[in-house]
């Protein structure tokens, strides 16, 4: 008969071993998924240039290599031109914004302290500051990247270059991993999904430009000192639906608050108006060309991806959701309908 102590030790070691294996597998999955996200970012990078290249090819009839090179050159010249025209002003406003952040925070506290509800909010914020270790750790964990920021950036860049130069090689190579009877359907699915991602990219880039221009014009007319850097923030954050526009309002509100609550709420009103107009212009186009993405589902998936992989997960959550919904519709919904029809 086995000794009870030895039996307990054996069970404890077994449970410990299973837990260690599960934790190790989860860690490997998280790391692998983070690398997958970087590769997915590279795919979006290549699709952006490929979308421009296809348009040029349709207009001119030139070869793909020529139009692809032209698309890269056009974006480079566009960026260089913007840097030449407004780069110095952007740099100055960024430095000024960074210098004013402590003043903006103190001004917000002083304004809040003038009301009873505001005092309670300030007290709550001070309690968070006193217990700031967990908050800072969570904040740093969210923005922690796989290989460091520049490492991740270069990974996305090189993934994108490789996919952009010869996308057919990777698509056909992936197709070879699929059983022959499903290969054609899989390749068609990849092409269809790539087309939908191009539509999404085209729409989101136009949205970013629209939000930047309208916000810049509005803030400039209102006489906000840091109008350009705030408009750039608003434009870039438009890439992240739901969360991005909400985040863009915060620095704009704080800058406006330096001139009083009236100006701050006018700035918030401008941002809300821009979002309403942008949704009215681009929303129907996206719903017509793309699968309709319920805002609540997008937000849930953004939070889930952010919890799993941090900032990259939030950044790429929406296009990844487009892929997942297209996958479900192609391999589950449509096949279920075909099965019911055949019965």
Image (cartoon, grey):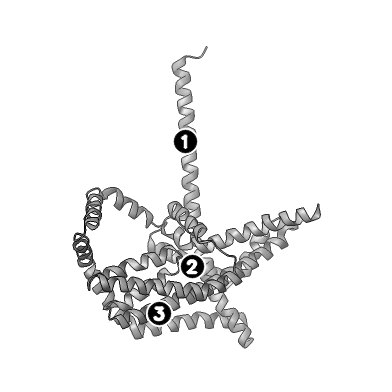
**In the picture shown, does residue 70 fall above or below 14?**
below
Q: Position of residue 53 (x, y in %)?
A: 57, 79
144 or 132: nearer the eye?
132
**In the picture shown, does residue 222 fall above or below 238?**
below
Q: Which residue is mark 2?
A: 158
Task: Look at 47% across and 14% down and name the residue there.
Answer: 3
Residue 16: image quadrant is top left
Q: Which residue is mark 1?
A: 19
Choose the circle earlier in sequence order: 2 or 1.
1
Q: Which mark is residue 214?
A: 3
Q: Label 3 vs label 2: CA separation?
A: 33 Å
Residue 226: image quadrant is bottom left
Secondary structure beneath dot 1 equals helix
Furthest residue toward top: 1
Q: Label 3 vs label 1: CA separation?
A: 54 Å
Task: Look at 56% across and 71% down and name the residue there.
Answer: 286
**In the picture shown, does residue 291 fall above or below 4?**
below
Task: Look at 53% across and 64% down and name the residue there.
Answer: 319
Q: Position of residue 230 (x, y in %)?
A: 33, 74
Task: Look at 24% across and 58% down and name the residue there.
Answer: 118
225 or 159: nearer the eye?
225
Choose the circle earlier in sequence order: 3 or 2.
2
Choose the circle earlier in sequence order: 3 or 1.
1
Q: Label 2 vs label 1: CA separation?
A: 37 Å
In this view, the mark in front (3 or 2): 3
């Amino acid at each position: 008969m086995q000794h009870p102590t030895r039996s307990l030790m054996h069970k404890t070691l077994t449970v410990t071993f299973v837990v260690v294996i599960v934790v190790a597998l989860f860690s490997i999955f998280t790391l692998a998924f983070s690398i997958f996200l970087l590769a997915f970012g590279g795919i979006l990078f290549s699709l952006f240039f490929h979308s421009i290249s296809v348009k040029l090819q349709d207009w001119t009839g030139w070869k793909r290599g020529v139009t692809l090179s032209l698309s890269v050159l056009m974006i480079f010249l566009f960026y260089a031109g913007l840097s030449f025209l407004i780069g110095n002003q952007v740099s100055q406003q960024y430095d000024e914004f960074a210098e004013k952040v402590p003043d903006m925070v103190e001004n917000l506290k002083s304004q809040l302290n003038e009301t009873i509800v505001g005092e309670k909010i300030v007290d709550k914020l001070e309690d968070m500051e006193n217990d700031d270790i967990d908050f800072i750790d969570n904040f740093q964990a969210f923005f922690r990247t796989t290989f460091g920021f520049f490492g991740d950036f270069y990974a996305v860049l090189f993934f994108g270059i490789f996919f952009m130069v010869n996308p057919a090689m990777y698509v056909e190579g992936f197709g070879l991993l699929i059983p022959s009877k499903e290969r054609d359907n899989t390749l068609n699915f990849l092409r269809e999904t790539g087309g939908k991602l191009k539509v999404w990219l085209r729409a989101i880039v136009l949205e970013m430009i629209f939000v930047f221009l309208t916000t810049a014009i509005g803030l400039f007319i209102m006489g906000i000192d840091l109008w350009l850097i705030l408009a750039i923030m608003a434009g870039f954050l438009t890439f992240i639906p739901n969360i991005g526009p909400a985040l863009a309002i915060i620095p704009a509100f704080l800058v406006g608050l330096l001139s009083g609550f009236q100006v701050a709420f006018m700035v918030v009103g401008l941002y809300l108006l821009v979002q309403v107009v942008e949704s009215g212009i681009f929303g129907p186009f996206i719903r017509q060309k793309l699968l309709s993405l319920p805002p609540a589902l997008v937000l849930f998936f953004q939070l889930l991806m952010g919890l799993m992989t941090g900032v990259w997960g939030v950044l790429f959550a929406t296009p990844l959701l487009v892929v997942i919904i297209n996958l479900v519709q192609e391999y589950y919904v449509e096949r279920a309908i075909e099965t019911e029809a055949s019965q």
